[in-house]
Image (tube, rainbow, N blue to C red):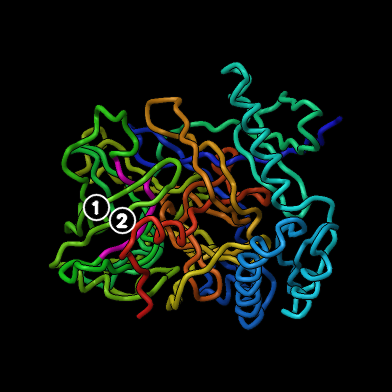
């Protein structure tokens, strides 16, 4: 049996500093300049530009997708022989079913809920069984052959198991129809400083999702990541909490023997100097998850007592960003140069060849009122410290793949249960907010890029927020 090969690019993790080398990927919907170098000013503008719909339709589709997600939870249990997944198609809500016992009952339930029924060949349960068999086969292959397989997923649209490969891989026909997606190998690169973040909290200002915070690796090396969502933790009223990416924690980027006993601290990002201490990483995971929980110091806690996500610069003094590069570097978290080698007290570059800011940046705030489950082809937007708001649609859910870009090593970290969004991210966006409608959807983990430029084929990868909350009882996203 022949497997169809199609080209794409698979996520490369990028995080950190020029000396702690790690580049994390970029994603897809390429921002268009609105003319004259102007920067869009709110999420609605980003929705219109990237999704080509108005805000009302964006909110409607996000809501319908959550109705689909709820139906899926019930249908997987009630109709396991025929249920094959759910997805959006523009404004249409689709339920995929296959012939078998319970088809008529499942189809009637879907239609009564207001969804359209699409008939496909294989149930979701059968596809997951096939996926598990393919994984077992890969695990039994020689190391070099197994390394050619980068990740896997069930593609609801095509009703197939898909494998991401670095090229030249084949799967025996007895494993069934499998689509092979040829992908670039994950690769590391220097952490490039793209200038002062677009989304930046001024000293003393409230801290919101999408804004930059700083990480100190040691006395001379540091990097920046983006805040995902503010949170609370049951039993701790003294401190505030926030959620970001796990690979932003320096202890997840080194050999276990090199980890520090004390948690790494996080700081205000202040142009030209290291900002005030904000708190520290209280918990983090990188493989098979990618999230961190930030415990905010009591004297800074009030700044995190909000449920906001922002996509643009503060209007307060000292928060104006410098222009971003013409060719933005790929990746999530970004880093600086060695302080000692630059002659600067902060290690930040004071020059930039770019003439215009990235047009993705926006400044409007969104109040988060809950959490959401990813659904294929639902609308989603992200806010990162460097690129602000950009929007796209969810490409796949329940994915596993290897993320690269760890400093000073070719080791890859396998992540599980992720989703991808067709939209753009660059270095410094890691840990940023991924939302749908007004709900928290995920944390920006990695993305895809070639030559550190956003292209229409790029995607970002995201850690579902519901997984983070379920694995940390008592942790809750702020909704007020």
**In the drawing, what numbered circle is on residue 282?**
1
Q: Tell me, yes or no, whether the two marked residues, 1 and 2, touch with CB atoms within 8 Å.
A: yes
Name the image quarter holding residue 136: top right
Confirm whether residue 365 shows in the render. no
| Residue highlighted by disc 2 | 293
Residue appearing at x 81%, y 33% in the figure = 3
Residue at (52% x, 39% y) in the render: 12
Quick check: is 377 in the magenta stretch?
no
Mark 1 secondary-structure assignment: strand
From the viewer's perspective, is 93 left or right of 407?
right
Q: Quadrant of residue 120?
A: bottom right
Q: Nearer the viewer, residue 378 or 55?
A: 378
Can you give x and y, in whole percent of width and height, for residue 249 in the image? Answer: 31, 45
Q: Quadrant of the N terminus?
A: top right
- Image check: 34 left or right of 256? right
In the foreground, 477 or 278 = 477
Few, some or many residues within 10 Å of mark 2 (<14, 14–19, 20+): many
Compute the Cα span from label 1 to label 2.
6 Å
Question: Can you give x and y, in whole percent of width and height, for residue 149 in the image?
Answer: 63, 30
At 34% from the left and 58% from the top, the residue drawn is 472
| Image quadrant in which you'd find residue 137 | top right
The relative height of residue 337 versus residue 85 in the rendered view (above or below) is above
Q: Is residue 246 magenta?
A: yes
**Mark 1, other Cα within 10 Å: few <14 / some 14–19 / many ≥20:** some
**Residue 251 seen by the camera:** yes
Position of residue 186 measured from the top left corner of the image (x, y, whole percent): 55, 33
Q: Which segment did they paint magenta?
A: 241-250
Q: Where is residue 291 shown, x and y percent of the image?
A: 39, 51
| Residue 109 circle label | none
């Amino acid at each position: 049996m022949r497997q169809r090969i199609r080209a794409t690019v698979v996520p490369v993790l990028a995080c950190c500093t020029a000396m702690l080398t790690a580049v994390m990927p970029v994603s897809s919907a390429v921002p268009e300049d609105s003319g004259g170098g102007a920067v869009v000013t709110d999420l609605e503008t980003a929705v219109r530009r990237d999704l080509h719909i108005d805000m009302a339709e964006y909110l409607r589709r996000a809501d319908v997708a959550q109705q689909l997600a709820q139906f899926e939870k019930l249908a997987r249990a009630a109709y396991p022989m025929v249920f094959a997944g759910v997805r959006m198609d523009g404004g249409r809500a689709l339920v995929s079913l296959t012939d078998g016992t319970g088809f008529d009952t499942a189809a009637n339930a879907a239609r009564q809920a207001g969804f359209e029924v699409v008939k496909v060949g294989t149930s979701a349960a059968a596809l997951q069984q096939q996926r598990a068999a393919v994984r077992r086969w890969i695990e039994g292959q020689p190391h070099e052959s197994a390394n050619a397989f980068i990740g896997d997923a069930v593609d609801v649209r095509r009703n197939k198991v898909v494998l991401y490969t670095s090229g030249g891989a084949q799967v025996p026909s007895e494993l069934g129809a499998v689509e092979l997606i040829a992908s670039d190998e994950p690769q590391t690169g220097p952490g490039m400083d793209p200038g002062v973040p677009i989304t930046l909290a001024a000293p003393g200002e409230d801290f919101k999702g999408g804004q930059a915070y700083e990480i100190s690796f040691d006395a001379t090396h540091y990097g920046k990541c983006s805040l995902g969502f503010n949170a609370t933790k049951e039993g701790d009223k003294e401190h505030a909490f926030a959620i970001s990416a796990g690979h932003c924690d320096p202890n997840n980027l080194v050999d276990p023997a090199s980890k520090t006993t004390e948690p790494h601290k996080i700081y205000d990002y202040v142009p030209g100097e290291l900002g005030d201490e904000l708190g520290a990483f209280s918990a983090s995971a990188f493989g098979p998850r990618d999230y961190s929980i930030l415990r905010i110091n009591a004297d800074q806690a009030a700044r995190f007592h909000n449920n906001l996500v922002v996509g643009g610069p503060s209007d307060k003094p000292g928060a104006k960003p410098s222009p971003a590069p013409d060719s933005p570097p790929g990746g999530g978290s970004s880093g600086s140069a060695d302080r000692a080698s630059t002659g600067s007290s902060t290690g930040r570059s004071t020059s930039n060849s770019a003439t215009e800011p990235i047009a993705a940046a926006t400044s409007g705030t969104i109040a988060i009122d809950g959490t959401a489950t990813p659904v294929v082809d639902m609308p989603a937007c992200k806010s990162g410290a460097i690129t602000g708001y950009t929007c796209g649609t969810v490409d796949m859910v329940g994915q596993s793949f290897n993320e690269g870009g760890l400093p000073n090593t070719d080791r890859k970290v396998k992540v599980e249960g992720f989703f991808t969004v067709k939209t753009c991210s660059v270095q410094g966006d890691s840990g940023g907010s991924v939302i749908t409608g007004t709900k928290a959807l995920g944390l920006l983990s990695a993305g895809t890029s070639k030559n550190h430029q956003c292209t229409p084929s790029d995607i970002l990868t995201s850690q579902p927020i519901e997984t983070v909350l379920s694995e940390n009882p008592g942790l809750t996203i702020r909704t007020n």
